[in-house]
Image (spheres, rainbow, N blue to C red):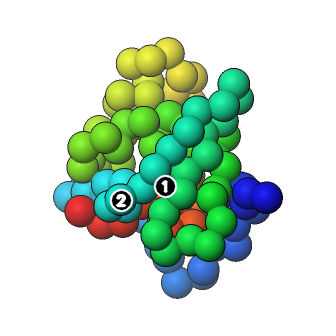
Amino acid sequence: MTGRVNATPIPDSMQFGASSRTGERWRRVAGSLMRRTPTSLVIATAASPEPLRIEGLAVSVWASLETARGIDEITDEIARDGAPTVGLDDDVARTLRDLVAAGLVVRA
């Protein structure tokens, strides 16, 4: 069985406000393995006992983190791929927070 990123509880201590959008960079956790399904990605890491399934915007954020990037860079790349831009900054920040809480993404 796999866990889903959107079901992962988010610690209240994790803040992704304006300051994190100006300079902090993020990357995929080292050594992660992934498999694509028709609607999602399944990702395994050394730190997780079970693989995690990510869907929707989380797949786009994960794809953009092939190299370390800041939130603005991630948002710009997803917008270039045709995503609606209204509220995209907040959605990307929230999704990035979910991926960090799930142990799939870390500060670069």
Q: From the image, which quarter does the C terminus lie in?
A: bottom left
Horizontal and vertical percent position of residue 29: 37, 61
The answer to which of 74 and 62 lies nearer the viewer is: 62
User: Furthest residue to the right?
Assistant: 1
Up/down of 91 relative to 29, above or below: above
- Which residue is label 1 attached to? 96
As drawn, the label of residue 31 is 2
Horizontal and vertical percent position of residue 99: 53, 59
- The residue drawn where x is 62% and y is 73% is 49
Q: Is residue 63 visible?
A: yes
- The residue drawn where x is 66% and y is 31% is 37
Q: Quadrant of residue 28?
A: bottom left
Q: Is residue 56 visible?
A: no
Horizontal and vertical percent position of residue 84: 57, 23
Q: Quadrant of residue 79?
A: top left
Up/down of 68 relative to 98, above or below: above
Report, in whole angstroms, how far the alpha carbon at label 2 lies from the one at label 1: 18 Å
| Marks 2 and 1, the one that precedes in the sequence | 2
Q: How packed is label 1: few (under 14 Cα within 10 Å), some, or many (20 or more)? A: many
Q: Amino acid at mark 2?
A: Gly
Q: How packed is label 2: few (under 14 Cα within 10 Å), some, or many (20 or more)? A: few
Under circle 2, the secondary element is loop
In the displayed structure, does residue 73 sit left or right of residue 15?
left
